[in-house]
Image (cartoon, rainbow, N blue to C red):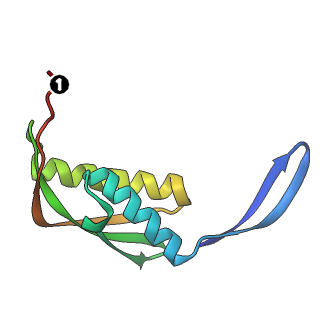
């Protein structure tokens, strides 16, 4: 991704170009997805593709079996929403679609403090 920037710092107009490599976008998407899905980085697979100038993101994560329970549709909606916001805020990229696939199951339990 690249864009022409015009920043006003102390009355000066600074011109230049900001470029994000495909790898940087990929790493950002993995980080956002792992946080959204509450899993480790090794449990996430992300594929980025062009969708008419916007991004299409495909995410594979394990489904979480949690206490208290969060449904699979709720987990999917959370991942979708956070990917869309995270890629916009982190890279200025519009995400047109997020496909979420669950592969495997990860059990987590709420910790109790005595």
Rendered-image quadrant of the C terminus: top left
Q: Nearer the viewer, residue 33 or 56?
A: 33
Q: How far across and how far down the image is residue 42, in percent?
A: 29, 67
Q: Name, please, the residue furthest toward the top.
A: 114
Rendered-image quadrant of the N terminus: bottom right
Q: How far across and how far down the image is residue 15, in percent?
A: 83, 63
Q: Is residue 28 above or below residue 26?
A: above
Please state the total of marks drawn on the protein image: 1
Q: How far across and how far down the image is residue 94, in percent?
A: 47, 62
Q: Name, please, the residue furthest toward the front.
A: 114
- Left or right relative to 10: residue 66: left
Count residues near mark 1 (Cα–Cα under 10 Å), then give few for <14, some for 14-19, many for 20+. few
Residue beneath label 1, please?
113
Task: Residue 37: tell me if it is visible.
Answer: yes
Q: Which residue corresponds to the image point at 14% horizontal and 28% vertical from the top-left?
A: 112
Q: Is residue 60 above or below residue 71?
A: below
Q: Is residue 97 above or below residue 109?
A: below
> In which quadrant of the rendered view does residue 69 lie?
top left
Q: Which residue corresponds to the image point at 26% horizontal and 50% vertical from the top-left?
A: 38
User: Helix, strand, or loop for circle 1?
Assistant: loop
- Left or right relative to 48: residue 14: right
> In which quadrant of the rendered view does residue 2 lie?
bottom right
């Amino acid at each position: 991704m690249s864009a022409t920037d015009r920043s006003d710092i102390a009355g000066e107009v600074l011109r230049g170009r900001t470029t994000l490599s495909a790898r940087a976008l990929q790493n950002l998407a993995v980080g956002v997805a792992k946080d959204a899905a509450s899993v480790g980085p090794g449990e996430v697979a992300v594929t980025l593709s062009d969708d008419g100038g916007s991004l299409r993101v495909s995410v594979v994560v394990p489904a979480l079996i949690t206490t208290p329970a969060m449904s699979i549709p709720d987990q999917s909606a959370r991942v979708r929403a956070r990917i869309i916001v995270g890629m916009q805020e982190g890279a200025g990229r519009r995400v047109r679609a997020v496909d979420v696939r669950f592969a495997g199951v990860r059990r987590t339990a709420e910790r109790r403090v005595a």
